[in-house]
Amino acid sequence: MNGSVIHLTTVSRPDIAYAVVKLSQYANNPNSTHMAAMKHLYRYLVGIQYLSIVYSNSEQELHGYSDSSYASDSDDCKPFCGYVFFLHAGPISWRSYKQANVALSTVEAEYTALSDSICELLHLRQKIAEIEQTPM
């Protein structure tokens, strides 16, 4: 896995987060399927290189989404989770990751993902409050 792709995911490309997390699992021992998927990801990035995140004044409320996929990984049955938070109609925080523990049900996987998302929401609300109180 190329470090620049991981950097893109962290800084400006939330749309490739799941693919990068999935491919990163096989970085030490990739096979031809993983290499083909990586080439596909690079072709995708070349095709969208002029697209960017746009912010506007239309949606000034902080809102977010959280999701989890129960036992979607056939290697170890750990769920994949993710969240994204929007402010001013653009994403300001996102994450895609594999949970550390095997979930026993869909509800448990969703609950864990939601719990992580709420922690991020509280952190974002605190940071926004600090920025709004800072005198200019």
Image (cartoon, grey):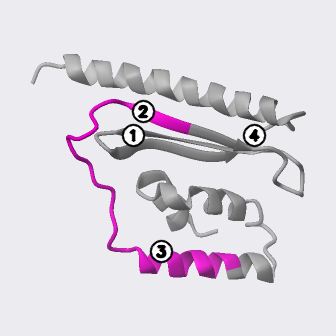
Separation of residues labelled 3 and 2 (CA atoms): 27 Å
| Residue located at (75% from left, 40% from top) | 99
* Position of 117 relative to 79 (above/below): above
| Residue located at (80% from left, 44% from top) | 70
Is the residue under label 3 in contact with that under label 4 (CB below 8 Å)? Answer: no
Q: Which residue is mark 4?
A: 99
- 42 lies left or right of 12: right
- The mark lying in front, picked from 3 and 1, is 1
For the residue carrying disc 2, how many other residues have a C-alpha within 10 Å: few (<14), some (14-19), or many (20+)? some
Q: Can you tell which quarter of the image residue 23 is in?
A: bottom right
For the residue carrying disc 3, how many other residues have a C-alpha within 10 Å: few (<14), some (14-19), or many (20+)? some
* Highlighted magenta segment, given as a residue range: 37-65
- 130 lies left or right of 121: left
Q: Which residue is mark 3?
A: 45
For the residue carrying disc 4, how many other residues have a C-alpha within 10 Å: few (<14), some (14-19), or many (20+)? some
Residue 73 spot, x, y in % from top left: 83, 55
Q: Earlier in the sequence, mark 4 or mark 3?
A: 3
- 17 lies left or right of 98: left
Which residue ends up furthest to the front in the rendered image? 58
Q: Earlier in the sequence, mark 3 or mark 1?
A: 3
| Residue located at (61% from left, 48% from top) | 96
Q: Amino acid at mark 3?
A: Leu
- 53 lies left or right of 119: left
For the residue carrying disc 1, how many other residues have a C-alpha within 10 Å: few (<14), some (14-19), or many (20+)? some
Q: Which residue is mark 2?
A: 63
Residue placed most toward the observer, 105 or 14? 105
Separation of residues labelled 3 and 1 (CA atoms): 22 Å
Which mark is on residue 86? 1
Residue 131 spot, x, y in % from top left: 25, 24
Separation of residues labelled 4 and 1 (CA atoms): 23 Å
* Position of 68 relative to 132 (above/below): below
Q: Earlier in the sequence, mark 4 or mark 2?
A: 2
